Amino acid sequence: MEEVIASTYRIIKKLGSGGGGNVYLADHLRLNKKVVLKADKRRVTTKTALLRREADVLKNLNHPNIPKVYDFFVEDDTVYTVMDYIEGESLDRPLKRGEHFSQPQVIQWAKELLDALDYLHSPTHGDPPRGFVHSDIKPANLMRTPDNHIVLIDFNIALSLGEDAVIGCSAGYASPEHYGLDFSSDSDTVNGESETEAESQSGQDGETEVDDSTVERTITESDTEATEVEGKKRNEKSSFTSPKKIIVPDVRSDIYSTGATLYHLLSGSKPAKNAKAVVSLSEKEYSPQVVKIIKKAMNPNPDLRYQTAQDMRSDFLHLRDRDPRVRRLKAVKRLDIGVVLLILAAGASMTFVGLKRMQTTENWLKLAEYSKSALESGDVDEAVRDALAGLPEEKGILTPEWLPESKRALANALGVYDLSDKFRSSGVIKLPSAPYKIKMSPDGKKLAAVYQSEAAVYDAESLKSLMTCPMMDSALADALFSDDSHLLAAGKDGVSLYNIESREQMWRAGMASTLTISGDGQVAAAMDRDRNIVSFYDMKDGQLLRERSMGDKKMPSAFNDSFADPDNAIFCLNMDGTMLAISFSDGGLYVMDAEHPEDDLIVYESSDYSEFAGGFHGDKFVFSAGKSGHSLFGLVNVKEGTYIGDMESNLRMKAKADERGIWVSEGNLLSEFDPDTLADKEIAFTDTWNISNFSVSDKHTLAVTDEPGFSIFDQGENALVHEKSDEEYSFVELGTEYAALANRSQPDIRVMKEETHEDTCVVRYDAKYSHDEARVTGDGEKAMLFSYDGFRIYDSDGTLTAEGSFPEAEKIYDQQFRRDGEKSWLDVIWYDGTVRAYSSEDGTLISEERGEAPSKDLEEEFSTEKYRFVSELHSAPKVYDKQSGKFVKELEKDDFLAYVTEVGEYILTEYVRADGERYGLLLDQNLEILADLPDLCDISILDKALYFDYKNGEIRKCHLYSIQELVELGKNYR
């Protein structure tokens, strides 16, 4: 039988144990999210209020190398901690397998670990501000993620909460202070004992060692501060001279453990348990500077170690500056030029230059990958910055030539060759913590986000914060736009209305968590998580209009609402605020009359439905109700007080409604319903993936799927954007110009902006005409669209000027569009060797010839000044040097090479995928890719122009950008 904790967390498996409890991998049942659940059964001596205060401090910790702490709760005398589940493996595992890590890798991990410790130690957490000591740093507590970063896990929460504290004491990594020993400068004894006795207690090499032993004591409310780092005392020396004083690890103890951990990662051997018996690493085998850093960190005397993680990290960051070899190099630069020339002649400097250029090349390649990753995640600003960083303006003997990978990254990040009308990632809003919910203003130009204890409003264009306000400490707390200029928030001190521009609080009312605003913006309804009373307020001044008691009815919420809002309930006012729809935790669903309780409509007094969604449209209330394996979509006429009807499905359904319309998703289909006839019209279809959430604007539809991923459709149900994602998006908002997506586990909001390029259109055509290729005439005034059965010719304004069909189309072997100066035509080739040429100007048959029958293997050849390209149907295109005939390179192996065109210093290759989609690649003369050209349809050699056909009724044009132009565009981006 599966174990469920707090009715919320289903235990998947046990990850480990030790100290005083167990660690589990668990599923959050309502959010379908994996978390780590730490169960601590040690005696709790701290008062509940203090426990909660400390818990709130730790929940606010936010660092990329520290797992997010979501919640604490006590059940059956066990303290549970809910934390991020970090994918990967702890570093002790590869060490046990005998895996060795490179010195650069260990240095990078050292920087990440010390950055996390600097954040953890910093006296900036809570009120009063203080820091926290980890106290058990070792390879087993460092998780290596799939992208090769590290995350510091298992920081000692018990110490900060004032429980029966268990200070981790892992042999070889623990500082002398962990054993109650004091080697500080002002202590001749160790807790009143001789140094010899102390060393005996700490253990000698060769003795049996037990990892994860513990030093236990009870920390009560009065001495909790002993484990915290007070801001004013952070850099003071600790004194442990009193025989009665308990030695507690401080930040310098973490420094020791960090040095010991790096020692093991670098050498593959764990250091001795006795700090004074540790054998220093060899300066011949490892960088002398790295050896010195580790040696200083592991000094038995805490006064002689680094006093802060920041100091130690600084030495790692400046390794190169402090390396004697670099200082010697700087000295060489000051030598007489004649001496330098002699050194160069000896080859020493050439070796250095070669190594430096290799390092620079490696860094540029990494930056190109970073740019690609940032672009895929939606952070265009970061993608442009990373790409530019790999294209520095400064050039010298140490700087190699710009890499094609860097050029490609910049071109793709800027999107200069993507002229389609689509929603394009415009940036990412970084939040202090993961969002509980997001909302978009009516005009679609502002975004509101609710996160830990705060809400913020952002400008969708600049992504800058416009205002913040304190919120109730609950994931249930709502923040809603009453109009484009005001925000209604479930504030820390009560429901509040804010003027966004002035950031002024207009009025404040009673405490509440769940809010709704009437369609006309005149009335607000509010309900608190702790009170079963609905309050109605006048939006003008916050005046309480009336209250309604719900009796013993409660709205659904998570077991602990500081973790997340389950978002499975209805709380919605109609247009004028006279009716309120509300669902309850027992499956009940009411449509309440705000002024006349006797006229309430009870859809369900109670039911076994657990998920509700819906809203009002005119005099109709629309809702969906769901449970495992069954869903229902229903309608109520609130004016007449009648139940219109419903439809049921075994697929998941979700209903939304406002004054614009009624929408219902069912499985992978999203439909809009006519409010009068209830006839449905399909507006989005996502193949085999179910739609989990959606948002609809006047022009577009945004659908999130459980793939996970999302798509944005236009009014013709054409997918403008389709992307897969690592996690399913929890929140989506769509306006006339912007789209916003976020999930509960990432502290950011991805913002997308609609881009139109109508000004680049050169030829219009009937979008309903199906065709395989589109080519532009030599003068650029017309376009010839063709497929295997015929063609059409359109002039620039979309007028159809010619149309024709090909005889015996089923016997056509190939089609090739030809140019000679401004003249152009289409050659159609039949299997019997017949070649007919059709004019691209008027479609007339120019010539007809009968030659040798072509080979049926569809092999084609293309030539540039330097290369010969051979394209075969079932193998990768091959490139040969024209002069020597030697094989040079294989091109894209999965797609068919259709055309090759040389334009100045560039080579453009055009491909056709198996599904018929066409694209191009821009190459340099070394056949390296400089840019991707999606939907490329034609190239003009004369004016170095590229044409694109998005099958939307327009052929669009842009010029071929030089790398210098792209760099300038990148500098001026945003």
Image (spheres, grey):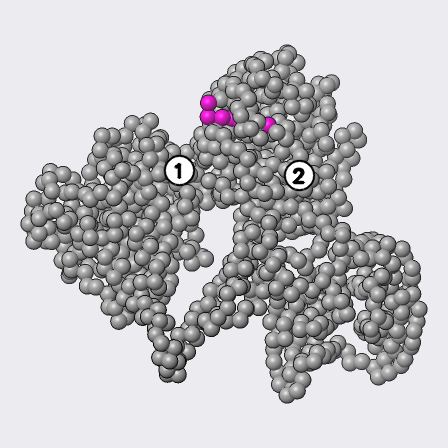
Q: Residue at x 76, y 67 (%)?
A: 943
| Corner quadrant of residue 736 | top right
- Residue type, label 2: Gly
Say which residue label 1 marks: 59
Position of the N terminus by quadrant: top left
Image height of 438 relative to 199, above or below: above
- Residue type, label 1: Lys
Query: Which marked residue is nearer to the observer: mark 1 or mark 2?
Result: 2
Say which residue label 2 marks: 735
* Residue 689 visible here: no
For the residue pair 210 and 603, the one nearer the viewer reads as 210
Image height of 955 relative to 532, above or below: below
Q: Bounds of the magenta span?
A: 486-493
Q: Residue at x 35, y 41 (%)?
A: 38
Q: Residue at x 61, y 18 (%)?
A: 540
| Corner quadrant of residue 162 | top left
Q: CA distance from mark 1 to mark 2?
A: 33 Å
Q: Which mark is residue 79?
A: none
Question: In the image, 227: left or right of 596?
Answer: left
x and y percentages locating residue 72 in the rendered image: 37, 35
